[in-house]
Image: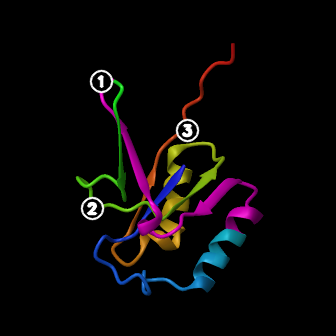
Amino acid sequence: MLLIHPAPDADPNDFGCTPADWIAFDKAVNEAGIFVSGEELQDLVTATTVRVSQTGERTITDGPFAETRELLGGFYVIDVPNLDVALDWAARCPGSRGGGGVEVRPVADFPQG
């Protein structure tokens, strides 16, 4: 999975790439046959965080975790043979520009049954 983190202090109108860059990346991922799923997430102001204490009490707050400055802007799930190939695709992702970053993490595969 490619988790797209824009720079926390970046201008929301300039992430170092254009819509055409995203369209080209989407096309490349699809043409390579590795696209599984992906979405852009809505603006940070639409986020809500839920925490449940050990006693089962639920706390709901607006926004993401206060302790982090990293924002999650969207994600791609790709099917590639190894980490090196995933890193190559992450480097091609427009979200890796302009002070942003793309976190690469394997999706957990739990046995059925």
Tell which residue pokes out farthest to the front in this image. 57
Q: Which labelled disc corresponds to residue 107?
A: 3
Distance, label 3 to label 2, CA atoms, is 24 Å
Q: Secondary structure at mark 2?
A: loop
**The residue under label 1 is which amino acid type?**
Gln
Question: Where on the picture, by quarter, is residue 71?
Answer: bottom left
Left or right: residue 77 compared with residue 67:
right
According to the image, label 1 marks what residue?
A: 54
- Label 2 neighbour load within 10 Å: few <14, some 14-19, many 20+: few
Q: Secondary structure at mark 1?
A: loop
- Name which of mark 3 and mark 2 comes first in the sequence: 2
Between 60 and 26, the one nearer to me in the picture: 60
Which residue: 68% across, 18% down?
Answer: 112
Distance, label 1 to label 3, CA atoms, is 27 Å
Q: Given this view, does label 3 or label 2 mark the residue nearer the observer?
A: 2
According to the image, label 2 marks what residue?
A: 69
Location of residue 98 in the rendering, given as x and y in whole percent from the top left corner: 37, 78
- Label 3 neighbour load within 10 Å: few <14, some 14-19, many 20+: few
Location of residue 60 in the rendering, given as x and y in whole percent from the top left corner: 37, 47
Quadrant (top left/top right/bottom left/bottom right) for the C terminus? top right
Question: Where on the picture, by quarter, is residue 55?
Answer: top left
| Residue span colored magenta | 28-55
Q: Which labelled disc corresponds to residue 11?
A: none
Q: Given this view, does label 1 or label 3 mark the residue nearer the observer?
A: 1
**The residue under label 3 is which amino acid type?**
Val
Q: Given this view, does label 1 or label 2 mark the residue nearer the observer?
A: 1
Which residue: 67% across, 69% down?
Answer: 26
Location of residue 18 in the rendering, given as x and y in whole percent from the top left corner: 54, 86
- Name which of mark 1 and mark 2 comes first in the sequence: 1
Between 27 and 68, the one nearer to me in the picture: 68
